[in-house]
Amino acid sequence: MSLEAHKALVRRWVDAWNTNTNLEVVEDIFASDWKNQNPLPGGAEGIEGVKQFVHVNRRAFSEIHLAIDLLLAEGDRVMFR
């Protein structure tokens, strides 16, 4: 996967987080065997846990908006600020 493709995944994730409407993108971005090292108490695991995490945080912080000020990619890693 190219660096630009990796960056596009991060942009899709940020968009999904901000809109809270297109969480199907989680299935495209996260590996099917992804494990959360810090799950919500009583929360689901894997991809469903990611979706649940977004819903819980969006309800708690309804005005939150992620913005990408800087997007860096190298190899298979991407970082945004």
Image (tube, helix red, strand yellow):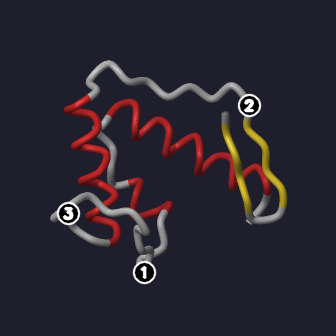
Q: SS class of the residue under badge 3?
A: loop
Q: Residue at (46%, 62%) from the top-left corner?
A: 28
Specify which label sits upstream in the sequence, 2 or 3: 3
Check contact, mark 2 vs mark 1: CB within 8 A: no
Quickly name the residue at label 2: 70
Q: Nearer the viewer, residue 29 or 80?
A: 80
Amino acid on which the number 1 mark rests in the picture: Asp
Q: Residues within 10 Å of mark 3 (few under 14, many from 20)?
A: few
Name the element at disc 1: loop
Across and down, in percent, residue 71 comes to 73, 38
Which label sits on residue 43? 3
Position of 57 compared to 69: left or right? left
Which numbered disc flags the more N-terminal residue, 2 or 1?
Answer: 1
Q: Which mark is residue 33?
A: 1
How far apart are labels 2 and 3 at the CA level?
Answer: 31 Å
Q: Earlier in the sequence, mark 3 or mark 1?
A: 1
Identified at 29% across, 54% down, the residue is 51
Badge 1: residue crowd in 10 Å (few <14, some 14–19, many ≥20): few
Q: Secondary structure at mark 2?
A: loop
Task: Kindly report which numbered mark, 3 or 1, lies closer to the viewer in this rendering.
Answer: 3
Residue type highlighted by circle 3: Gly
Q: Residue at x 24, y 53 (%)?
A: 52
